[in-house]
Amino acid sequence: MTTTPTLETAGGVKVVKPTVGSHIRDYFGRIRGGDLGALPAVLGLVILVAIFGSARSDTFFSAGNFANLFNQAAGVIMIAMGLIFVLLLGEIDLSAGFTAGLCGAVMAVLLTEHGYNQAISLVAALVTGVVIGVVLGLLVSKVGIPSFVVTLAAFLAFQGMLLVLLGEGKNISIPDGFIKSLNKDSLPVGWSWGLAVAAVAGFALVQFLRHRGRARRGLVTEPLGIIAMRIAGIAALLLISTAILTQERAINPAVATLKGVPIAAPVIGGFLVLWTFVLGRTTYGRHVYAVGGNAEAARRAGIPVDRIRISVFVIGSFMAAVGGVMLVSRAGSVDPNTGGSSTLLYAVGAAVIGGTSLFGGKGKVIHAVIGGAVIAVIDNGMLLMDFSSGTRYMFTGVILLIAAGVDALARRRAAATGNR
Amino acid sequence: MAATPLLELRGIDKSFGPVQVLHDVELSVYPGEVTALVGDNGAGKSTLVKCISGIYTIDAGTVTFDGKQVAIHSPREAADLGIEVVYQDLALCDNLDIVQNMFLGREKVRGIVLDEPTMEQMAGETLASLSVRTVKSLRQLVASLSGGQRQTVAIAKAVLWNSRVVILDEPTAALGVAQTAQVLELVRRLADNGLGVVLISHNMNDVFAVSDRIAALYLGRMAAQVKASDVTHSQVVELITGGRSGNLGLPPEKPTDFVDITPGADQ
């Protein structure tokens, strides 16, 4: 350590002074040490986009298809965001798919058969999700049934309730309005740019305020170069995406014009910011990680472990309800298979592919978005290449297996380097 | 050497159903001193510690803290008095960093947002007061620390809250030679900073290396509490294994309420 420049931080503890170079070296060190984070998913996404892009460059790389990806992925990403909280405690929610379907059906039935307005129906769907979460959480934490069994039972029960609610195989279409446009329409071009610029500015402001706050206390700060690179990266991603999405996508622009960022994108972004804030910046989020990492240590530190356990199921089912709304909005209708078939497995897959561990304690909300994007790209790209749905399922299965394998190998590597 | 004990236990009894684990136990902890609590397996060391820290309630006896008689009913009450316990199986979360672990359950907040700069500053100052001057970063995950460093974080977590008495349950049990020395040095420094330290240990070398007083438990009774300088290594071993040594320790007659079941022993 004689050659490394050190720095005195709070109280005089000597730490290594970070530079842009040391930051990059640290990052590669962490990766070699088995702390991969979302890197495999991002690499996978780039490779998949390159493959599908070269095979079907005219259709895959069109602005219309790019916009389509957001709508395809929105439902699964919402469910996956909620699942991340559940997975962080090392629990699982197998019923999230049909929770989404059931909440969507509650909304559709209220809208059509009982004639309630859009807002009340939407709130009713979300409240249904919260109630389901409370019940699941109580059964797991207070009664002590393993979450696998509780949610497997709920999976069957909710499937049944969905059938009963829809009257044996009926298909309910929802009327036009706010809910239907959520995962179907796009923002006006002006709004699209405004939101993108506001998001970049907000991100930059948060980064600079944090840097200034730490520097003023004499704490170790990240080099400004790293912060600038991070802001530039986010700005490029958001602004280039907005530029593509604000192009004309309609087949016949003379009849009806179609441009702007899909409404689904800011919905995903909003929940991403909300839950990232909750997990990373609040006492509650800290306690979720603590219970997931070492429940006994958390209990001794005075953290109400049972209440945390219930709360993650509430958030999980609430986000499943949001996902259900997005699924119904996209399809324009509810049927007995909404939230069924591969929805749940895609959501769990999204979280795991994104880098969240199935063993608890490790994961971020962004993993749901990255993993969800991987799954949506596979589905979308293979559809464009005219593969049958059988082949698509098999391919998605292989990708999920690779992701879980990478997680397991990284975990072994991490255990070997003492960096679990 | 301070004259009045910071923490004083008198006549502590504790039973679990028909089994009486502690009989009339007395213990005095002085500020600025390390009191070693020794005893064989099952002598009641852990039970005594759990009684002090509020995990168990005592059946009889008095606890005096800082001259005032107190009743401790929960770990939270013990912590409020300034009594902290560092458990043997370190209560740290591997997936959190040093600062996050030190403030676990008692996070500083501003509004609803965690006040990370304040916490990091306090953690740094505490580590510095314990003369821990080299960590790679205060934001390092606990998983990547060595056993001695982890023990240091656990101890730092206990002293962060202006605690007065720190109880260490076998802090060196799982450590190598160099790390043991490092932790013992830290234990000594806690006492030098004016805290009352209780060190539970099986290792006589560790006990004699740092402690000012030695309290030996034998089958739930306090055999003797003596100054470390007044006894020898072998006397302490005799106190642990037999309850007495020469004129020290329990009276020679057998305790009436237990039966010697040693094969071949005279009844």
Image: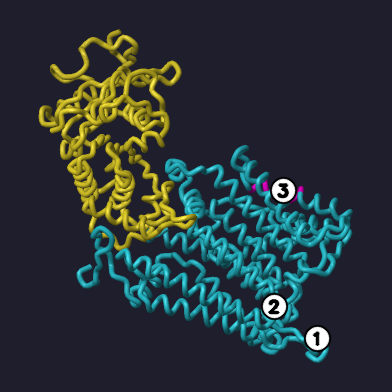
Chain colours: A cyan, B yellow
A281 w.r.t. B196: above or below = below
Residue appearing at x 57%, y 62% in the figure: A274
Which amino acid type is marked by label 2?
Leu
Relative to B101, A201 lies left or right: right
Is residue A298 at all visible to an observer of this figure? yes
SS for dot 2? loop
The residue pinned by badge 3 equals A154
| Residue B177 colored in magenta in the image | no
Residue appearing at x 49%, y 48% in the figure: A291
Marks 3/1 in contact by CB < 8 Å: the verdict is: no
| Residue A152 colored in magenta in the image | yes
Whole-percent x, y for residue B257 in the image = 34, 11
Relative to A140, A20 lies left or right: left
| Chain of the residue where label 3 is placed in the rendered structure | A
Whole-percent x, y for residue B132 in the image = 24, 54
Which amino acid type is marked by label 3?
Ala
Instruction: Locate the N terminus of chain A and report the quarter of the image it occupies.
Output: bottom left
Is residue A382 at all visible to an observer of this figure? no
| Chain of the residue where label 1 is placed in the rendered structure | A
Which amino acid type is marked by label 1?
Ala
* First in sequence: mark 2 vs mark 1: 2
Q: Nearer the viewer, residue A195 or B246?
A: A195
B79 w.r.t. A111: above or below = above
* First in sequence: mark 3 vs mark 1: 3
Query: In the image, are marks 2 and 1 on the same chain?
Result: yes
B168 w.r.t. A174: above or below = above
The residue pinned by badge 1 equals A256
Marks 2/3 in contact by CB < 8 Å: the verdict is: no
Q: Residues within 10 Å of mark 2 (few under 14, many from 20)?
A: many
SS for dot 3? helix
Q: Nearer the viewer, residue B23 or A116?
A: A116
The residue pinned by badge 2 equals A187
